Amino acid sequence: MFVVPMMWFHTLFISKLFPKYKEYLSWSNLSLRLSLAAVLNLAISALVFQTSNIGYFEKFLCYAKECIKLRKMYELWPPHRHAVLYLIYSALVHCAIRYCLHVTEDGKKNELRPFYRKYLHSVLLSTLIFMLTLHVQRINELHFAIIVLNYVHTLVAGAVVTFICS
């Protein structure tokens, strides 16, 4: 893991020596954080969506009736393993949470703490992304448990990006 020491190097060492380049260093720090989030999302996706995990679903009797759907999953899994797609996803989630879902203060006491607000934004955005990509997933070819697993994966991926980059 070379990315984490580079983030510390950028934030602690270089920003002290070159204070007028602090804005550029914050962009480089953000790019390192986005790449770390993309690598973590790629690793989580690779661990969860393996073809060897389909055997766990085949063991249960409630899935035995739908063996055609389970056989089709061997063709659909694993998902994309291109790191660039995960990097683009991380950047878009970060921009949406940072700029589009920014809550403005109206002078009243804010009831949500920043941590809970970030988590709520992450859940809302992940749910929106899941709903917008649901038609692409060929719903009638997948089992309900797999769709739920994909939703949980989308929630985790959004939370990883939110908490690493914010």
Image (tube, rainbow, N blue to C red):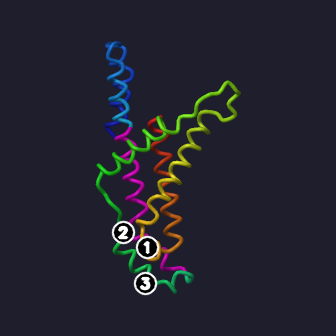
Q: Secondary structure at mark 1?
A: helix
Q: Amino acid at mark 3?
A: Ile
First reached walking from the N terminus: tag 1 or tag 2 = 1
**How many residues crowd around disc 2 within 10 Å: few (fewer than 14), some, or many (20 or more)?**
few
Q: Quadrant of residue 54?
A: bottom left
Q: Position of residue 30 (x, y in %)?
A: 38, 32
Q: Is residue 112 left or right of residue 165?
A: right
Q: Which residue does the numbered mark 3 point to in the structure image?
A: 68
Q: Amino acid at mark 1?
A: Ile
Q: Which mark is residue 25?
A: none
Q: Nearer the viewer, residue 139 or 50?
A: 139
For image coordinates 47% across by 45% down, the residue present is 160
Q: Nearer the viewer, residue 15 or 59?
A: 15
Q: Secondary structure at mark 3?
A: helix
* Alpha carbon separation for disc pair 3 and 2: 15 Å
Magenta-colored span: 34-60
Q: Which residue does the numbered mark 1 point to in the structure image?
A: 54
Query: Is residue 91 magenta-colored?
Result: no
For image coordinates 44% across by 76% down, the residue present is 141
For image coordinates 50% across by 67% down, the residue present is 147
* Alpha carbon separation for disc pair 1 and 3: 13 Å
* Alpha carbon separation for disc pair 1 and 2: 9 Å
**How many residues crowd around disc 1 within 10 Å: few (fewer than 14), some, or many (20 or more)?**
some
Q: Which residue does the numbered mark 2 point to in the structure image?
A: 77
